[in-house]
Amino acid sequence: MGIVLYKDGATEIGIGHLAIKDWWAPFEKSGFGDGEPTFTDTIEGGDLKYAANILHDETTKVGCAVKTCNKDGRLVIDCRYDNPLTTDDTIYTTGKVCSKCKDTATKSCSKLGGLCVAQP
């Protein structure tokens, strides 16, 4: 899944910061609700789709590119994820901090964030 964001008057470096703020703001405002967060058609069609893919517990790689459109001077940022969400996918599994890290040989507990971290 690609994410495209247009911003007037931004620099190629500054657009990354603007994009992250724009993608995060809807989640910070409303979250996904109670219970296991599930990627629904409503999320896919709304502002939470960006935060959902960033927070997806199967996302281990994100790649982004920025391009200036010469015709009108706008900047475009496009980001791709290694495991994009589809309808009815669980965004992340809730539970006790790092409790699921031991379930796989490819993850360990990050003491800093209390999250499971994929090992290279």
Image (cartoon, rainbow, N blue to C red):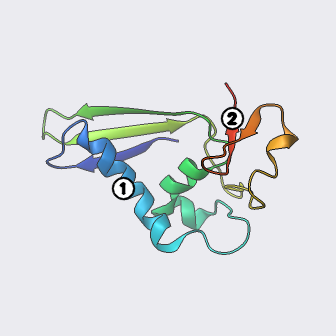
Query: Residue beneath label 2, please?
Result: 118
Q: Quadrant of residue 31?
A: bottom right
Residue 71 locus on image (x, y percent): 13, 36
Identified at 49% across, 65% down, the residue is 27
Q: Is residue 101 above or below residue 21?
A: above
- Disc 2 marks a residue whose amino acid type is Ala
**Dot 2 surroundings within 10 Å: few (below 14), some, or many (20 or more)?**
some
Q: Is residue 11 above or below residue 19?
A: above
Query: Residue beneath label 1, please?
Result: 21
- Is 45 or 57 nearer to us in this picture? 57
Label 2 secondary element:
strand
Residue at the extreme right: 103
Q: Is residue 89 left or right of residue 59?
A: right
Q: How many numbered dots are placed on residues in this image? A: 2
> Which mark is nearer the camera, 2 or 1?
2
Q: Quadrant of the C terminus?
A: top right
Identified at 83% across, 31% down, the residue is 105
